Structures are given as structure tokens and as C-alpha cells.
Amino acid sequence: MSIHCELLILILALTLDGQVHTGEIIGGREAVPHSRPYMVLLEKHMQNGKTKHCGGFLLNEDFVMTAAHCQASSYTVLLGVHNVHKSNGIQHISVVQTFPRKDYDETDLSNDIMLLKKLSSKAKLSTNVRPIALAGQDDGSLPKSCIVSGWGRTDKNTPYMSVVLMEANVTISTECEKEKSYCTEGDTGPGNGDSGGPLVCEDGKAYGVVSSGALNKYSYAKIPDYRSWIDLIMK
């Protein structure tokens, strides 16, 4: 086992202090291994020397999307992960350029979306590593049945991340939505450590970016409202 893998396992056993406190994926389930090949485990290398984690998702060979509040001094993108204890096939790619929304507000987490460009090397696409399509401005009908996934906490009583990728069904609600965001309600939702992961709906496209949550209400940056900005950055 490589030193990097051993270090990753050690890090994942530590508590997730300092991350946005969303709910936990209670009632979720383990995802079928590599059934969500766009999923990214994002290592955040902090200024104090600690390593923390967020979720993310692959857009193409060069770009990953995550939440703007997943800020760090530097990043490593991990692709092809299901069980974090199994290092076979996992790609580790350093991020050199970050593109958070300039109007991101860390107080209310509005415009909580960020693009990461992996300049050290391109992602090697395979069965286990594949990009996901984004919902566009033309996808006007409101999606309802969606899925969130990640390696965040699975229980409100534990501070530890999940060893395997978990997923849970959520339903978009119009009762709690804000400008440029989707909202889901209930006991099931993204957990601490899942920030930056995708909200994937019926047509298999990513509609939202996991942002925050409180009192069983979870907020997601609304990707269709940012498509012009996304396309501009990626060009």
C-alpha cells in the first residue's frame, strides 16, 4: 500500500471539523460500485497543514465542479473512488486553477459554486471515470426525483466519513427554494463532507451543487442559472 493511500485512510478516520453542517444521509444506501463514475472525492489541503474533504463531480478531462465554500490552499482530485480503502485504479490529480463565483457570499452561501481546473494532468476516462452532463437553461421543467451521493457522514452521532460512496433519494420542494438554488426537505439529505457533490435528477444530468442545510432543509446551487458562466470559464 502506498504512503499516499495510508495517509488517505488515516485522514478519513479523523473528524470532519470546520465543514458546513448539513444533515446526514440517514436512510441512504451504498451506491453500486462505480455506478456514479463522475463522482470526485476532493482533498482540501488547508493552510494549517490539515487535510479536509468535500465532494465534487467531473465535467470533462480538465474540469471539476464543487461548492465555493470548499475553499482551501490547494486541492487534489481523486477519481475512480468507491471504497477509500482500495487504492487500485484511483487517479490523483493536482488542481492548479480555481474559479469560484466572484459574487459568492460566505454569509448566506449564495452563488456557492466553483470550478477547478486540473492542469497537472488530464483525467483518464474509463468505465469508472466519466463526466456528467449539466442541466442547461433550456431544461426549464422543474425536476422532482433526484439523488445525492458522497462520502460524508452517514449518521448524526458519528463524526466520521463513510468508507464507501453512499447515495440517497431526495425530492425537490418549491416551498423552501431561494434565488438561484434548489431545496429539498426531510430527514434524508447530504451529510457533513458531501458539500460540492451533485444533485442528479431523472434525466441523469446534474441540476445542483450541494451547498448547505439546516433544520432538515438542504440547499443546492442551481446549475441552469449558471450555465453561461460555466460555459465561459470552460472555454
Image (cartoon, rainbow, N blue to C red):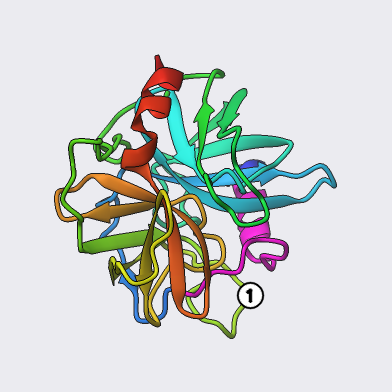
Spot occupied by residue 208 in the image (x, y as percentages of width and height): 36, 50
Q: Which amino acid is tagged 1? A: Pro
Q: Residue furthest bottom?
A: 157
Magenta region, main secondary structure:
loop
Can you say whether 153 is above or below 201 in the image? below
Residue in the image at 44% along x and 67% along y: 218
Spot occupied by residue 158 in the image (x, y as percentages of width and height): 60, 80
Pointer 1 residue: 159
Q: Residue furthest right?
A: 48
Whether residue 157 is visible to the viewer of this picture, yes or no, is yes
Spot occupied by residue 46 in the image (x, y as percentages of width and height): 76, 44
Residue 22 is a magenta residue = yes
Spot occupied by residue 231 in the image (x, y as percentages of width and height): 36, 23
- Residues drawn in magenta: 5-24
Badge 1 marks a residue whose secondary structure is: loop
Residue in the image at 41% along x and 80% along y: 26
Q: Residue furthest top?
A: 235
Residue 184 is a magenta residue = no
In the rendered image, the quadrant that contains the C terminus is: top left
